[in-house]
Amino acid sequence: MGLRSSRFSAGFRRVFVMGICVLLIGMNGLPGEAKCDIKAIFNFGDSNSDTGGFVAAFPPQSSPYGMTYFHRPAGRASDGRDAIDFLAQAFGFPFLSPYLQSIGSNFMHGANFATSASTVLLPTTSLFVTGVSPFSLGIQLNQMKEFKAKVLELQSKGGMRILRISQSDLPQPDVFGRSLYTLDIGQNDFTGNLPYIGIEGVKQYLPQVVSGITETIKGSCMELKLVVGTEVELTITTQKFSVEIARLLMGLK
């Protein structure tokens, strides 16, 4: 997990905005009439958008991480903010709290399930052997499902009052259908195996990773019941990825 500079973060932010594939699912009204009414952001991914999940699970993090903006290690794999931080700020939200962070988290405007070194496919080795995170994309989706279930349970049964949980720390039940879901992952599926499988092996491996992403998106829309007013924003790092995933999601042959 290398350190990215703030100059990289700023450049990546431009790529993030310009090179994005946005999927609008069931927006209210016609496309020309749809209004952006985003109440929260839920993010999945790896070090490109991790805001402290990996460090919460495997502390500590030392300098020079975070030195240019936070002036201290802040769980990002850079010396400043990540692209997801700029996105949250653009919507007027606070920085996304990592789902795995137990102290100081506020999930009212979303949560971040991304952890550095995460993969799309379930890892077949240990973090302590190859450095691959155990929190693969499927695990992150399960965490999101559990998060939503707990929020709805607490809100419906007065659990927040019983457990003395501040209502300002958790999203309202209707937020999940009015949120932006972002996904930025896939590079670690290739970089970890590249010395062993080579470029040709990567080409053969690509369909599995693409399929893993598309199935996760489809599954999340079904299982999280994302129907009305939901946006899924997908950051793709290569043109081939973007074309293949868009094709599969639209059911094209």
Image (cartoon, helix red, strand yellow):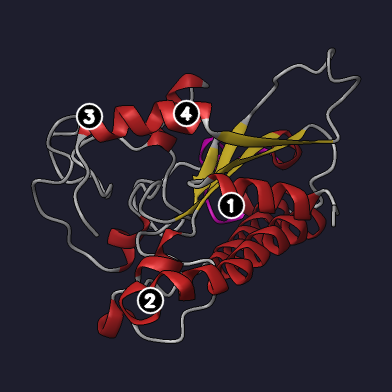
Task: Report whether 21 appears left or right of 157.
Answer: left
The residue singled out by tag 4 in the image is 87
SS class, disc 4: helix
Residue sitting farthest toward the left: 63
Residue sitting farthest toward the right: 29
Contact flag, marks 3 and 4 (Cβ < 8 Å) = no
Badge number at residue 241: 1
Which numbered disc flags the more N-terminal residue, 3 or 1? 3
- Label 4 is placed on what type of residue? Leu
- Label 1 is placed on what type of residue? Phe
Q: Nearer the viewer, residue 72 or 215?
A: 215
Which numbered disc flags the more N-terminal residue, 1 or 4? 4
SS class, disc 1: helix
Gap between marks 2 and 4, in whole Å? 31 Å
Task: Name which residue lies at 72% across and 63% down.
Answer: 215
Which numbered disc flags the more N-terminal residue, 3 or 4? 3
Task: Name which residue lies at 63% across and 37% down.
Answer: 21
- The question of residue 30 being in magenta is answered with no
Task: Report whether 33 appears left or right of 195.
Answer: right
Locate residue 208: give its quadrant: bottom right
Instruction: Provide the residue span drawn in magenta.
Output: 162-172
Q: Nearer the viewer, residue 186 or 64?
A: 186
- Label 3 is placed on what type of residue? Arg
- Residue 115 in the image: above or below residue 5: below
Which circle, 2 or 3, is nearer the viewer? 2
Which circle, 3 or 4, is nearer the viewer? 3
The residue singled out by tag 3 in the image is 7
Rendered-image quadrant of the N terminus: bottom left
The residue singled out by tag 2 in the image is 193
